[in-house]
Each structure stands twice: as structure tokens, then as C-alpha cells.
Image (cartoon, grey):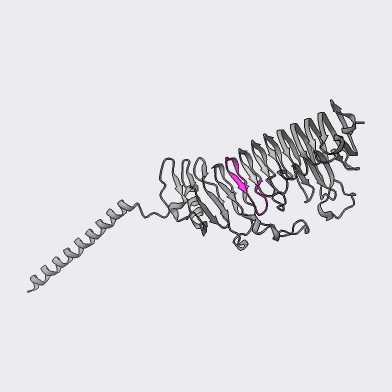
Amino acid sequence: MALRNVAMRVLLLLVVVSAAYAAKGKEKKKESADGPAASGPAASGPGGEYDITKLGAKPDGTTDCTEAVEEAWASACGSTGNPTIIIPKGDFLTGALNFTGPCKGDGLTIKLEGNLLASNDLAKFKSNWIEIMRVKKLSITGKGNIDGQGKAVWTKNSCQKNYNCKILPNSLVLDFCDDALIEGISIINSKFFHMNIFQCKGVIVKDVKVSAPGDSPNTDGIHMGDSSNVSIIDTTIGVGDDCISMGPGTTKVNISGVTCGPGHGISIGSLGRYKDEKDVTDITVKNCVLKGSSNGLRIKSYEDAKSPLVASKITYENVKMEDSGNPIIIDQKYCPNKLCTSKGDADRVTVKDVTFKNITGTSSTPEAVSLLCSEKKPCEGITMSDVKIEYSGTNNKTMAVCSHVKVTATGVDKANTCAA
């Protein structure tokens, strides 16, 4: 009897073990068919591609796709080689996207063929919309749009009345990124700046379109600060503020083949708003067209600058104006909306070694040249050659308005050069 009981127990144990192995075998077959149950999505395609629609993103323009896009970033950034995040055709709505490195691979590409749409629920944003930080060898390419959908919130912008206003989200921000390429895409209707480059080295913006209505507030096209070796090439920008603005600490910048308008022009500054700003130097603007912009080539600094800095080694060459206001302007008394606290007794910004060469076309204002320099910090080393701008109004006659500056001029009407 005892032996029979033992035999029965052994038989029962064998049945249980066999069932367990069978179940495990089924799980392995299912895993093999459906893919491994890993913590992140498996890359598919050559080079490791992460398609946001395979991670749950829906291209309907109304479903919040933030989680899917950030999951794609986390997986791609954690991969070796040269992974690619795919944003296919369609409309993908998101809140704030924080893409933080450093990444493991040799480089990372975001292929944008569809449209990223920013939510208009401002509670979803702590600061910026798409912020990419501490990434090397980043590429954002494609024919899609980064659409800030700013029209719904522009009325909430109070920055033109209040220095300490609440800043609306910038659309695309690169912080501490080296060797970045932005090519082919469009950035439109940002809530605030369309693109902001901060403390980056080696950034190329090529064949990009940036657009917003001319009356949209503070919608700068491309702003940069504390960055070096930045190139903006063959890019079209029409916005409600500066097409390009180069803030303090900007060095070694090449701007070529840019069309600007509408907008406030291609600007250096504003400079001097904050304490301990760094110098701006080695800037070249070449082969550009400004169409209907309210300003042309502009250098602007606050008359109540908080600390000393220098803007120098600046060259403008082969630039055409098409009915742009103030085609050439240096303004060391810049004070938007008359919010400055000084009467000019605190001028601390030096502007020197600036060249204007072959600047042609038409001006919408009689003042083709305005060099409004500081009494305490006069402009130095200003050179003009082949500057030929006509007023598009009555008589086609332009004039120069100048203060505290000496100009060396060749091949230019003396009345329009501020030459001694």
C-alpha cells in the first residue's frame, strides 16, 4: 500500500513538471513570434529605427503623443550606433518634450516627415516645448513641420509691456549641443521664439523655413547666445520679430543665403540687458535678401546696459534690401517700449570694427543709414564700401542719421555714409 502511494505521488509530480515545461515552451514560442518582452521597444530597420506610431502615437492631431515620442527618444538615446527616430506623415500632438543626453551612440537622427503640433494647454509646459540638451552629433532632417500653434496664445504675451513677463514656450531649443544639423524642416507659428541655440558649438541650420505672421509677438526666427561656430545657410525666415538675433557670447557665426521678411531684420543684440554678458565677435552676414522687414542689418544695445561688453569684427557683404526699413542701423540707445531706467549715463557697450560692403536695394524709410552711437562709447572702425540704397518713396533720396561715429567710406554717396 505504501509503495503504491509513493508511486502515485511520483506520477503526479511528473505530470506537474511536464505541464510546467509545456507552458514554458508555449511562452517561448509566443515570445519568438511576437518579439522579446524587453523593457524598451526593439529597433527595426537598418541602423536602428524607432517609429513613434509603433509606440502608440496616433497621427490624428488630437491624441496626446508625448509619451510615445519620449519613449522613442529614451530608446534611441540609449542605443549604440546611429539610431533614428521616425516621425512619419500625419499630425502628432504633444506637450513638453525633454530630450536629454548624453547619448550612447555615435550620433542620433530625428527624421521628421510628419507634423509635430504643440498643445495649447500652457499647463503642459514648464518652459520650452522641444528642448534638446547635452547631445552630440544630432541631426533633425526631413520635410515635416514643427508647429507651435501659437495663434491661440499670442494674446497672453505681455512682454512688450513688462520686463518681467511670463515667457511663453519656445518651439525648438538646443542647449549644450555640439555638432548639430537642422536641415529641410519647417518651424512655424511658435508661441515665442521658433528656435533658440544656447551654449552650443558647431550648429548648422540649412534649407529651413521659419514662418509666423508679421504681427505675432516675440516670434524670433532663430536666436542664439553663448554659442560658437554657428552657420545658417539657404534659409527663409518671415516672423513677427528678429529673423535672426545674435545675443551675448555669440562668436564665429556665418549667415549666408538667408531671406528675411517680414520681421525685424538680422540683428546683433539686444546687448546689455543683463549683468556680466559676454562679447559678440567674428560675425559674417553674406549674400542675403531682406524683404519688407522693419529693420535691415541691426546692432542694438540697451542704453542702461548692466555691464561692459564689446561687439566687434562684424562683416555685412552682398546684402540686398527690398523695401526694408532702416537698412543699416546701429542703435546704442535701444530701449523698447521706453522701459529703460537710465538716461544714457550708463553706456557700457562698445561697437567697433564693422564693415558694410555692397549693400544695395531700396528702403521704405528715408533713413538708409542710422548710426546712433553713444557719447561715452562712440562707434569705432566703421567701414562702408559700395553702399547704394534708394528710398522707395518720393524722390528716391535717402539720408544718413549719425551721432558719435566716424566712418571710412569708398564708392558711396558721402551724404549717406556719416563720413567726416
283 relative to 176, above or below: above
Q: Nearer the viewer, residue 368 or 134?
A: 368
Residue ranking furthest to the top: 411
Which residue is at a point 76% across and 47% down the rendered structure image? 277
On the rendered structure, is 159 left or right of 178?
Answer: right
Q: Which quarter of the figure has residue 331?
A: top right
Residue ranking furthest to the front: 394
Residue 283, given in percent of the width and then of the height, sits at: 73, 36
Q: Which quarter of the figure has residue 126?
A: bottom right
Query: What is the total number of numbered labels drawn onto the structure image?
Result: 0
Q: Nearer the viewer, residue 156 or 312?
A: 156
Magenta part of the chain: 176-197
Camera sees residue 69: yes
Residue ranking furthest to the bottom: 1
On the rendered structure, is 195 left or right of 418?
Answer: left
410 relative to 49, above or below: above
Which residue is at a point 52% across and 52% down the rendered structure image? 91
On the rendered structure, is 44 left or right of 108?
Answer: left
Is residue 180 shown in magenta?
yes
Residue 357, given in percent of the width and then of the height, sits at: 78, 29
Residue 90, given in percent of the width and then of the height, sits at: 50, 50
Residue ranking furthest to the right: 420
Is residue 419 shown in magenta?
no
Quadrant including the C terminus: top right
Q: Which quarter of the figure has residue 324?
A: top right
Residue 166, given in percent of the width and then of the height, sits at: 71, 60
1 relative to 269, above or below: below
Q: Nearer the viewer, residue 204 or 22?
A: 204
Quadrant including the N terminus: bottom left
Camera sees residue 181: no
